[in-house]
Amino acid sequence: MSPEVAVPYWHVWTDSEGVSHQSRCQLNDFHTAPIQPGATPQWIGAKTQQQATVFVTVLPVGWIGNWHENPHPQWIIPLSGRWFVETMDGVRVEMGPGELSFGEDQNTRPVGGRRGHLSGTIGPEPAVLMLVQLDGAPTVASPCRFR
């Protein structure tokens, strides 16, 4: 573990009762190494070795999606603009460029018309998001699973 390096992220996860939540977590399992042979060493924290698909999506100004689950466990990185995520427990988190979220709210159960999370844009510009969807299965009742 490297106390010198900590990168915060939000984790959208499902508890054993099927309710989604958000927890503030930290990536802090970094080591120094070159990214390739001969490169200058830097802090590296590899989190998965699964297959992944990368998307860039643009949410228009005023966009609010329906309640839904993340289609796959996925890292969400805002590149520009602002957006929000509200989970079934009523927690709403607003994020902007460079803030990380890991969406893993699969396996939720409908409660009062809500299932998974609600998300939308904030402010006068579109939200441009990069999504890195993982092929692996989601965890349940495991907040902050990445360290």
Image (cartoon, helix red, strand yellow):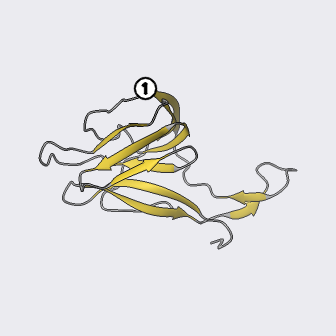
Quarter of the image where one finds residue 22: bottom left
Q: How many marks?
A: 1
Question: Would residue 48 be visible to someone looking at this image?
Answer: yes
- The single residue placed furthest to the front in the displayed view is 124
Q: Nearer the viewer, residue 142 or 82?
A: 82
Quarter of the image where one finds residue 5: bottom right
Amino acid type at mark 1: Pro
For the N terminus, give its image quadrant.
Answer: bottom right
Question: Alpha-carbon neighbours of circle 1 within 10 Å: few (<14), some, or many (≥20)?
Answer: some
Describe residue 117's horizontal placement relative to residue 11 as left or right: left
- The single residue placed furthest to the right in the displayed view is 38
**Residue 146 placed where, x, y %?**
49, 60
Task: Reply above or below: 64 against 146.
Answer: above
Q: Nearer the viewer, residue 42 or 91?
A: 91
Q: Which residue is mark 1?
A: 60
**Residue 71 placed where, x, y %?**
35, 37
Question: Would residue 147 be visible to someone looking at this image?
Answer: no
**Residue 11 placed where, x, y %?**
41, 55
**Residue 51 placed where, x, y %?**
52, 40
Q: Nearer the viewer, residue 49 or 70?
A: 70
**Secondary element type, mark 1:** loop
Describe residue 7's horizontal placement relative to residue 86 as left or right: right
Residue drawn 58% across the image and 47% down it: 98
Residue drawn 38% across the image and 40% down it: 72
Q: Nearer the viewer, residue 117 or 141?
A: 117
Describe residue 65's horizontal placement relative to residue 57 as left or right: left
